[in-house]
Image (cartoon, rainbow, N blue to C red):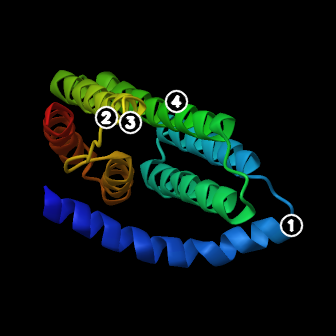
Amino acid sequence: MERVERIRDFIQVYVQQAITPFARLLTYLRVSPNQVTIVGFLVTLASAGLLLSSFPVAAGIVFLAGSALDLVDGTLARLEQRATPFGTFLDSTLDRIGEGAMFAAIAYGFAIQGDGPAVAGVVLAMLGGMLTSYTRARAETLGISCKLGWVSRPERVVMIGIGLIFGILEGVIYLLAVLTVWTASR
């Protein structure tokens, strides 16, 4: 578990370095972190719509793009020293709704194909993801350190995007179901 955290921290350093110039540009353009949060949310909702319209590759690309804006809003808030409790609440709430919309679109796709086990996998993956996020947030409010396991939100987003783009969504969903429930139970 500690190795996973080290890898996650290592990747996060490079991702932050990559998005900081874009965040600086947004600062120059006077774009607020909350505006970026809302645009990212709308893009994520659009990705669910693309999936419902039977464009899985486009849905995967748009889902990853919308989710990437989630990294930008936090960086922008820190650069501008405008991080607020409301912004944090807005960001985390819209993240959950956007991810839930994508899971709902995936479940619907499997349901119309008559693939009951895959629908169950989506439900487990979604519940595991929600429980992981809730557990971490609740622990932090109680002052307890809560290092996540193998699959936190960034990993879920990347796995879903890869599953959509490469046509391996069902396998990814089963893997997510196992890993998110395992992560939440740790």
Element under disc 3: helix
Amino acid beneath label 2: Gly
**Earlier-in-chain disc, 4 versus 3:** 4
Which residue is drawn at the image coordinates 66% and 46% (left, top)? 37
N-terminal-most mark, 2 or 1: 1
Rendering quarter of residue 78: bottom right
Label pair 2/4, CB-CB below 8 angstroms:
no
Which residue in the structure is indicated by mark 4? Answer: 97
First in sequence: mark 2 or mark 4? 4
**SS label for mark 1:** loop
Q: Mark 3 points at which residue?
A: 140
What amino acid is found at the position of numbered circle 4 in the picture? Ile
Q: Mark 1 points at which residue?
A: 29
Query: Which numbered circle lies on residue 184?
Result: none
**Viewer-side residue, 53 vs 179:** 179
The kind of secondary structure element at disc 2 is helix
In three-dimensional space, the C-alpha distance between marks 2 and 3, rounded to whole angstroms, equals 17 Å
Q: On the picture, is 10 further left or further right than 85?
A: left
Density class for disc 4 (Cα within 10 Å; few <14, some 14-19, many ≥20) is: some
Question: How far is mark 2 from mark 4, CA to CA?
Answer: 12 Å
Q: Indicate which disc, 3 or 1, sits on the residue closer to the N terminus.
A: 1
